[in-house]
Structure formats: C-alpha cells, structure tokens
Image: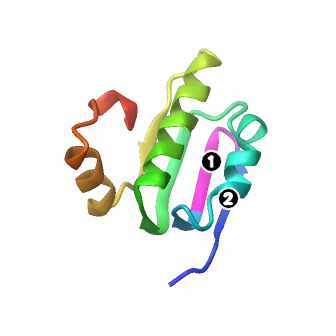
Amino acid sequence: MADSLCWTREGGRLSLQGELDQDFLVPLWDAREEVTQGIDTIDLSAITRVDTAGVALLMHLVASIRQQGTSVSIVGKSEKMNTLVQLYNLPPDLIP
C-alpha cells in the first residue's frame, strides 16, 4: 500500500498515484490552482485508497477545472470511489 499521494501532469491529464485520503491530500490541496490549469482529464487508476476527504477534494478539482471553461472527465475510478459517491447520493456530474 502506498504511503503518500503523488501526481503528474502530462498534456491535459492529471494522474494521481497513492492514497487520496485526509492523511496525504494537503499538498495537492495547496497546489490545486496550478495543478488544474489546462487539465481536462483526472486519472485515478493508480489510486490505492480513497476516503470522503479525497472525494471532496476531487469535487473541488472538478469545479476548479470547470470554472476555467473546460469540460473534465475522471478515468480509472475504483469501486470504492463509486460506492462513496453513491453513499453520499452525489449527483453524477460532481465526479464525472
């Protein structure tokens, strides 16, 4: 299991790796404005763990990208992510 959260940007893709949870997401939160510039895809395929704080951060990243006038998609969502989205009865467009 990973013990941190890392990210890379390539073209319009933001790829997250590791644990997207409250223990590790502060650096991404702090860098969110620069990280979302020019992004249209968030790749979660290398995320090993997610909690509700991670879902909240993703919703914020999606909203930030949309405020830039860009459509965004999330790829590589795990069953855990889908379960959390359903559990909180979130509209599908918040985590597209």
**Image side of residue 38 versus residue 96, left or right:** right
Is residue 75 something one can see in this rendering?
yes
Look at the magenta stretch and give its main secondary structure.
Answer: strand
Picture coordinates of residue 23, whole percent (x, y): 59, 67
Is residue 12 highlighted in magenta?
A: yes
Q: Does label 2 or label 1 sit earlier along the sequence? A: 2
Eyeballing the image, is 31 above or below 64?
A: below
The figure's colour scheme reads: rainbow
As helix, strand or loop, the secondary structure at mark 1 comes to: strand
Figure check: 68 above or below 19: above
Q: Label 2 to label 1, Cα distance in Å?
A: 7 Å
Indicate the position of residue 75 as horizontal and vertical percent values: 42, 48
Instruction: Answer whether residue 67 is magenta in the image.
Output: no
Mark 1 crowdedness (10 Å alpha carbons): few <14, some 14-19, many ≥20: many
The extreme top residue here reads 69
Q: 20 left or right of 14?
A: left
Q: Which mark is residue 14?
A: 1
Identify the amino acid type marked 2.
Trp
Residue plotted at (76% across, 45% down):
31
Q: Which residue is mark 2?
A: 7
**For the residue marked with disc 1, what is the amino acid?**
Leu
Q: Quadrant of residue 95?
A: top left
Q: Secondary structure at mark 2?
A: strand
Closer-to-camera residue (59/52): 52
